[in-house]
Amino acid sequence: MTGSWITHRLGVVGLLCLVSGCAMSSRHAGMKGAEGLPDPRLVKFEPAAVARPNLETRILGARGGGGVFDPGPPRVQTPSSDLLSFTGATNLSVSAWFVCHALPPAGQTLAGLVGRFDPADSADSEWMLGVRADGRVTLQTTGAGEIASPSAISTGTWIHVGGSWETDGTATLFVNGVQAASGTLALPTGGSLPVTLGDLAPGNGAYALNGELDEVKIWRRAMTLSRAQSLYSAAPDSDSDGIIDGNDPDDNNDGIPDDWAYENFGNSLAGDPDGDADLDGFTNEEEFISGSDPKDAASSFIVSRVGANDHVSDPARRNVFVEFYGLPGRVYTMDFNTSLMSENWQTVMVLTNTVEGTVMVDFPHSLSFTGGFFRVGVGLAP
């Protein structure tokens, strides 16, 4: 990709700013610049229980399922129904997609995903699927202990979980289509609690999930491994890159993260990388790399301050310094040249692992006052 230069004349010392790109990925056909497509994010939850004996009971949300939960009330609860109860006379299984933005904090032993469960009311509690404070997924029945996944989940990543309770007293836990745990759990006796999503009863936030839920399903039958695999593999992967849409930072493979496209264009699949929304001469992708606003022609990657370290008593040893606003995931390269007519640029410094905020760079004093030009380039980290 051809870089675009902004030149700052500073008397003896000049400064250039470069926005440079990296290798582009192939783009998904038909998705480039897909303005107006519905954004795939979860935005609200509108609960409804659809009960069908011996088939699945779906807890429906926005666009077929989904809810965003913050660490506090209110929770989402469905009306009580015998079809959502497990009395030991029939099998029961439950599945859901979820993402934890953060694990339960200190003092909170677990976060409820879905269940009819109140830790303080053993008479009415039945079953629950949740996440422990150590990040392990747990399947529990009232007063009967638990089975739990052997390893912790990753926060910020969509996970598919499934739990199955059977009339012979066995229970099985599936994570991402793989059997994670199995064991014996005493059968629950039945109760009158509603199904609670994103918390445990009574739904006051004491066991709140800090995250999101989608596609919660309940069956009055056992879950097999093949069924768990089928549910997991059914997750959409629009660009067929092996990463489900919910975990794919760039679901149309256009080189621009979906979150950045959503923030700047209102649609996670919008914003043609080669387009120039504000007509300032920089493509949308270059604006993403540099951290500038693609809709504001006055916004660009600039060096905000240039000067010399005047506190150094020896003028010959006063370094020239520059300041600019840096972003994580970028590589900033500082080059020096004695003439703009020459291509003989010498790299004098490379910055990686920057954090978001003001970056101040001191150039070597041996170059600072010999006469010439500095330039600053920004690209994506490999």
Image (cartoon, rainbow, N blue to C red):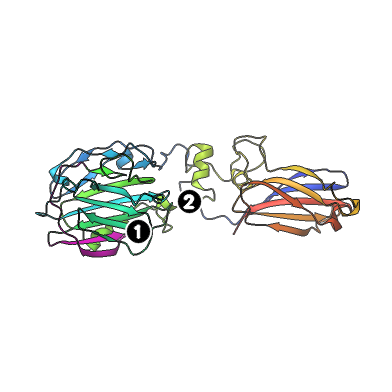
Please give the name of the residue rendered at 58% of the width and 42% of the height, measured from the top-left corner: 275
Left or right of 47? Residue 80 is left
Q: Residues within 10 Å of mark 1 (few under 14, many from 20)?
A: some
Asked if residue 340 shows in the view, the reply is no
Please give the name of the residue rendered at 90% of the width and 50% of the height, measured from the top-left corner: 315
Query: x and y percent of residue 268 in the render?
Result: 47, 43
Q: Which residue is mark 1?
A: 136
Q: Secondary structure at mark 1?
A: loop
Of the residues shown, which amino acid type is indicated by label 2? Pro
Instruction: State which quadrant residue 317 falls in.
Output: bottom right
Q: Is residue 361 above or below residue 284?
A: below
Q: Which residue is mark 2?
A: 249
Q: Residues within 10 Å of mark 2 (few under 14, many from 20)?
A: some
Front residue of this view, candidates 299 and 66: 66
Asked if residue 112 shows in the view, the reply is yes
Q: CA distance from mark 2 to mark 1?
A: 25 Å
Q: Is residue 192 above or below residue 375?
A: above
Of the residues shown, which amino acid type is indicated by label 1? Arg
Query: x and y percent of residue 95 in the render?
Result: 26, 52
Instruction: State which quadrant residue 134 falls in.
Output: bottom left
Q: Is residue 145 above or below residue 98?
A: below
The residues colored magenta run 168-194
**Label annotation for residue 254:** none
Front residue of this view, candidates 124 and 233: 124
Please give the name of the residue rendered at 49% of the width and 37% of the height, measured from the top-left corner: 266
Query: x and y percent of residue 167 in the render?
Result: 12, 59
Query: x and y percent of residue 138 in the render?
Result: 29, 57
Residue 169 in magenta stretch: yes
